[in-house]
Amino acid sequence: MNKYITIMISSRNNAKFANKVLSEIRKELKNIIEKETLFGQNIYKVWINEEEVSSNETWDECIKQARENDIVIVLYNGEAGWVRNKKNKIGICHAEMMAAIESSSEKVYVIDISNGKRGKTEADKIFYEDIQSYRKMGIAKNLTELKDKVKKTVLDATLNLFKKGVKSSKKSQNLGTILEWKKFNYEIRSKKIKEAMKRNFEDIKDDLVIYEDNKRKILCKLHALPDSATVSAAKEKVGQPFLNDIYISEELKKFDGGIVHFIGCYKTITESQVRKIMGFPDVILIKDEFGIYVADKIYKIQMVFLEKCIDESNTIKQVENFFDWLYRSGEIEEFIKRAKDRKEIILKIAEKMEQ
C-alpha cells in the first residue's frame, strides 16, 4: 500500500503561463506540495511526466498515472496537447483527464489558466467542449493565483478523500439503520425508500412529488426496487411505470413538466437491466455515482435509478448526488425540456383517449 497521497499534475509541457514554461511551473508546484507535512511527516507524492517518463512511452505511462493517482489536477491552458497520430482528435492532456474521470470523477480538479485563449486545432476544440461541462476549481490569471489555487485544491481534495473513505467504511458495516433495513420485508423497505426520497422534494400525494428549478415545477413519481432487479418479485414492484403516466394527466396539468420517474434501488442495477425495464435499447443512458439516468429520445420518458438505497441517509444522499451531477454536467436544461415535452405528449394522448 502506498504510504503517500499521490497527485498527478497534468498540463501542456512547453506552453507558457505568466511568461514561464509550464513544465518548470509544474516542478515548482511539485516542490511546494511535497514539502507539506502532517505531524512532521511528508504525506504527498507528486507525479509529473518530465521527471519520470522516457519519450517512447510517454502516452501510455501518462494514461496509467492518470488512472492510478489519488488526485489529478488539470491545468487547462486552452490546448489539448500532442496527438498520437495525425488522424487522432484527442490530445494527451484531454486523454489524461478522460482516463482520470473514468477511474473516479471525484478525484479530478480543473484549474483554468487559459486567460480566455483557445487552441485552434480540432483536438483543442474537442477538449474545450468537453471541459466546459466539467467542474472547475476556479481560474488563475497569474502565478501567485495558480499556486494559491493549487494549494486549496490539494487541501479540498485531501478532505474529500478522507470523508469518502469514512463513508465507505461505514457502508460496509451491518450495523444501525443499515442492519435494520436488511430485516424489512419488501413492502416496508419500499415504503422506507420512498419516504427517504421525499425528503429532497415537495411532497404532494400518492408518491407524487415536485422538483422545482428557478420556479419551474416538474412533477415526479417515486418508486422503489426493494431488492436486486434479478428478483422477479422485487422487479414487479416497479414494472414499466411510464405506461401509467396517462392516468396522472389531470394532476400533470398544474405543473410545467413531467412525469419523471425516480426509482430507489436497494441494490445496484446494470445498464442492461435498465434497458429491459425501458423496453427498447436506443436510449440516452448515463451511469454515475448516483446510479443510472435514462431518457428516451422519442417519447421523452425520463427515469432515474438511484443505487444502494440501503438506509435513509444513503437514499437522501443518492438523490442529492443525482441533482449534483445534473447541474455539474450542465444537463439541467435538457432535463427540464424533456419533462416539458413529456407533458405535452401525455396530455395529447389523454385528449385522444377522451374522444
Image (cartoon, helix red, strand yellow):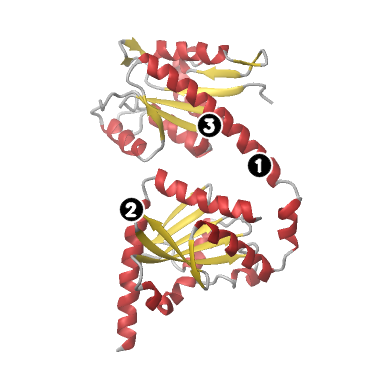
Q: Where is residue 237 in the image (x, y as percent from the top left)?
A: 59, 72
Tell me where residue 224 sits by quadrant.
Answer: bottom right
- Label 2 Cα neighbours within 10 Å, binned few <14 / some 14-19 / many ≥20: few
Residue visible at 31% across and 14% down in the picture: 16
Q: What's the residue type where badge 1 is placed?
A: Ser
Q: Where is residue 264 in the image (x, y as percent from the top left)?
A: 57, 60
SS for callout 1? helix
- Mark closer to the chain start, 2 or 1: 1
Residue visible at 33% across and 87% down in the picture: 354
* Mark linked to residue 251: none
Q: Alpha-carbon distance for marks 3 and 2? A: 31 Å
Q: Which of marks 3 and 1 is in front?
A: 1
Whether residue 61 appears in this view of the structure is no
Q: Is residue 217 left or right of residue 322?
A: left
**Does 226 appear above or below 310?**
below
Residue on which disc 3 sits = 67
Residue on which disc 2 sits = 333
Say if mark 2 contacts mark 1, CB within 8 Å: no
Residue on which disc 1 sits = 168
**Does 73 appear above or below 339?**
above
